[in-house]
Image: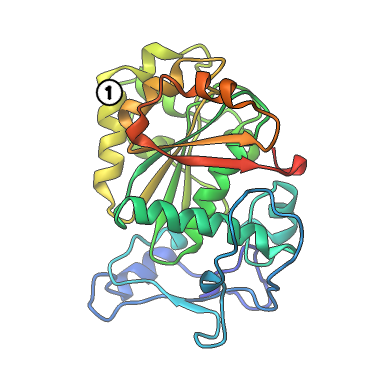
Amino acid sequence: MAGRGGSDKSRSKEVDLETLLREIDTHADDFEIDFELEGGVSSGSGYTPVDFSVAKDLVPHEETGGRQRVAPGRELALLSETEFLDSRTLDKKRIIHPGMADYSIMNDFREIRTILLQKSENKNFVLIVVSIDTGMGATFTAVNLGAAFAYEGERTALLIDCYPKKGNLGDLLDLGNKSGLTDYLDDTEMDAADIIYPTGISRLRLIPYGNNREAGLKHLTTERMKEFIGALKRRHKDRFLFINSPPLESSADAAILAEVADFVLVVVPYGKVSKSRLERAMRFLPPEKIAGIVMNDYKQYV
């Protein structure tokens, strides 16, 4: 089964999902999925947007032939993807992928992934990604961390947009005005499955903010919100949740969201924020939950 970022009509064929699921036992001990990473990937030597070193051990290499295996019983998110985003579209949206020209950027996010897994002792977690102010790269960081986890064959990622500003995750991934988090919190009859959407990247799903852009704090502090996030984390042990948060300086939402998160990752532009300003913005965050600070140092990636 091809696992490329884009469709490859010369190699793919139509598969009837219901027939496929009847014919295979996805919980069998010997069940596995093979997929190939796109070949010809260079290590890259360009300017990287974040201040982390290259994790060369995570790059596809000759010993495995660039192949990875999905462990038995994993959620088959790949099968329900209707259409994959191709490399050109991913580049335009500034989303990392195995075929990108500057592979060092993808390695930077994989390095952050490794650090987060070490902090969590390899258990799934809920992570808030937040910046000091608008335009500093928090949304870019959130979506690409989700992609970095999703590209690893044994894990799935779920992006949750808690930032009401237009032009964020829902628009980035072309969901338009579909129902999302605020609609779910407003309607106790709505099922969680109704607001989880494919992104065009296998094993990466998205919950958009929703249509109630004026929701704000009263939604984020409800017990329904806390129970919802907890249930999403517990249901799939291989699923990692990434919350796109409003900036620290313009909203108290980030500090409130920290109550439902395991970790907080703060994004700041390198050399553009003073230490005192950073300390003031972070003073309401629980110190024990701060996983680190990403120094975004590339104007293209904000």
Q: Is residue 119 above or below residue 107?
A: above
Q: Is residue 281 in view?
A: yes
Q: Residue at x 36, y 30 (%)?
A: 287
Residue nearest the viewer, comparing 151 with 132: 132
For residue 203, say whether it is visible: no
Give the left or right position of residue 163, taking residue 51 as reference.
Answer: left
Please, what is the three-letter code of the amino acid marked with disc 1?
Answer: Arg
- For this view, does 267 lie left or right of residue 229? right
* Residue 135, quarter of the rendered image: top right
Question: Which residue is drawn at the image coordinates 75% and 49% (left, top)?
Answer: 92
Q: Quadrant of residue 196?
A: top left
Please tell me whether mark 1 sits on a helix, a strand or a loop: helix
Q: Where residue 186 sits: x, y (%)?
A: 37, 17
Q: Position of residue 59 (x, y in %)?
A: 57, 72
Left or right position of 47 against 168: right
Rendering coords of residue 9 (x, y %): 67, 72
- Residue at which label 1 appears: 224
Near-viewer residue (238 or 79): 238
Residue 286 coordinates in the image, percent (x, y):
35, 27
